[in-house]
Image: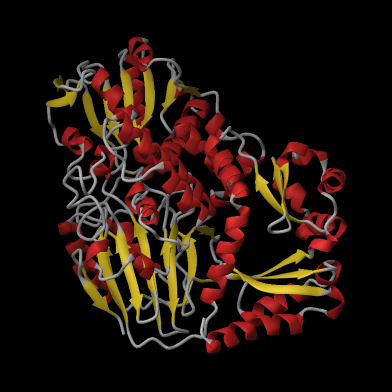
Amino acid sequence: MTEEEKHEAKNILETVKELVPKDAGLTKADFEGPDVVIYVKNVSAIYGDENVIRNVSTTIKKKLIVRSDTSSLMEPEKATKKILEIVAPDAGVKEEGIRYVPEFNEVQIEAMKPGLVIGKGGSTLIKIVTETGWVPRVLRIPTMNSDVIKGVRQMLFKEADFRKKFLTTIGRKINQPIVKSEWIKATALGGFREVGRSSLLIETNHSKLIIDCGVSPEPAIKGLDAVTGDSNKAFPYLDSANITINDIDAVILTHGHMDHIGFVPYLFKFGYEGPVYCTPPTRDLAALLLYDYTKLVIRGGGTPLYEEKDIKKMLSHMVTRDYGEVTNVTDEVKLTYHNAGHILGSGLVHLHIGEGLYNVVHSGDLKFGFTRLLDQADIRYPRIDSLFIESTYGGPRDVTSNRQDAELQLMDLIKGVIDNKGKVLIPVFAVGRAQELMLVMESYVANNPKYKLDAPIYLDGMILEASAIHTAYPEYLKAGLQHRILSNNSPFESEVFEVAKGERREIVDRGPSVILASGGMLNGGTSLEYFKALAEDERNAIVFVGYNSVNSLGRKVQNGFREIALPGEDGKLVPVQIKMQVRTIEGFSGHSDRRQLMNFVQSLRPGQPKKIFTMHGEEAKCEDLARSMAMKFRVEGRAPMNLDSIRFK
């Protein structure tokens, strides 16, 4: 930092010191990522007046974290006993679920019912910190076992010393004096006029941000990399952006699907050391999908782009933010996430650049319509100058059927196939579509005698682990579903479902059944195994309920291919006759259809953006949607190509 920059940062900390009550005994103030942290000897002086934290945060325009000075901390053994005395037994807190992180003077408390640990208005938390000195951080225990959540939490616990230093470094870098940028531009690095490898570079002459950094589905599963395969359409065009890895100030993720996150560990493999911003569920879902990707590629005899150590490095550099939190990601750019309604933790990205100079919203993938899982996408933003919006179903004919009709169509099909002694295979994305379909089936089978099935509904692949992660973040789900999970009545654990165990051949050889299997595009994984085993029996059916990319096996089956060559047990291609019923039922997608996309823009408040750029869709759909929005809303509408640059200012 220059002397001027140090002076500016010092001014923020000096302001904090002036506003903190003298009897708090302030011993230290510093930056921690996008936040400011203070250490005090007497936390009661802070928490005794509910206005102190609010006043300081408002003045410095940053989140204030209050911690006890190390000299005020109770010994962990005594503190644990005290915490167990303070917290109600019904909270489900166990001694082994209490862990101390001295690097942050924090105690992590895992609880089945975090609300009882928090208390009304945070009263129980305040009692814990005032009586033990340790600042409690409450973590929800998922109602289902989750190896991913256990692994991520354990890894972050072990990396506490590194994360403390990392966050302090990032914080000091962010808090430099704001210099008005001379220009702002965006460069399309992937996912424009196509679906896959989504990535957008936002640049000023002071900041460089990457929004999403994904891979295209089919090449990623095949394990193609720059050495072993045709990677022309697999990965973002980072090497054409005239920036180096070290030039990137931050990576911002919209949600945890591979076409948005799959290339991020590769950045760390080649030296990126900066922050990755996302919501808490996105972090855990990213861990699930990225680890699974490496295993899937290795099982298929390919070479993954990166190793597990690169994924762990990425996780240790992640900075999580909830919806609505305004966060400085550079000295001149503020980030706020808004609910996108697509999958758990998915966020529309709002960037406020240069103290009001320009405002950009990036949709990621969004759903502006009914789902059983999530509330629809947010429409209120302080200001939008430019909007980047997905176009997966942006074509003029992309109008999905009524949701209730779609549900009845699905259940009638399932009932008919089961009655005919067949099996129904539903390939689903393990994150999002699987849970949506589970909610539909659980509701009909449990509550409607007409659809009571005399056959099991199997869950196979990553579905169980992904569902467990959903139970750890009920606050991100619809209110009714949140209530069920908090009441120990999670639909994801309903007796309606049966976990697939043993050899998959055994399930195929049994009687009629419904099989929900991960791998929504038949691009590998469990769905492909079942497909090969079931395809040649005309009593069976395969039902597509989500998007299949242009070159995916799922799209070929959808388009009527009656014979496909697939690898056999010895790796050689074997022709598979497709005699099973092939059905596509629209209405369950986590993407908005054409009408919903138009309604989303129409509903934006305080008004429509001046410029709209379409992305994440096939070429014709991106172009048509851009033209239609330009005409309807009388704004500039464009469908950029990959490598196009757009100057805003």
How far from the left and from the top, in percent, is residue 383?
43, 78
Q: Is residue 429 visible?
A: no
Q: Residue at x 39, y 51 (%)?
A: 265
Q: How many numbered markers are drawn? A: 0
Left or right, residue 490 beside residue 368 = right
How far from the left and from the top, in percent, is residue 367?
39, 54
Left or right, residue 206 beside residue 136 = left
Q: Is residue 462 visible?
A: yes
How far from the left and from the top, in percent, is residue 332?
46, 80
Q: Is residue 177 above or below residue 435?
A: below
**Looking at the figure, which quarter contains the C terminus?**
bottom left
Q: Residue at x 44, y 33 (%)?
A: 463
Q: What is the quadrant of residue 264 in the picture? A: bottom left
Q: Nearer the viewer, residue 4 or 288?
A: 4
Q: Is residue 512 above or below residue 150?
A: above
Q: What is the quadrant of residue 631 in the picture? A: bottom left
Q: Residue at x 77, y 78 (%)?
A: 20
Q: Nearer the viewer, residue 416 or 331?
A: 331
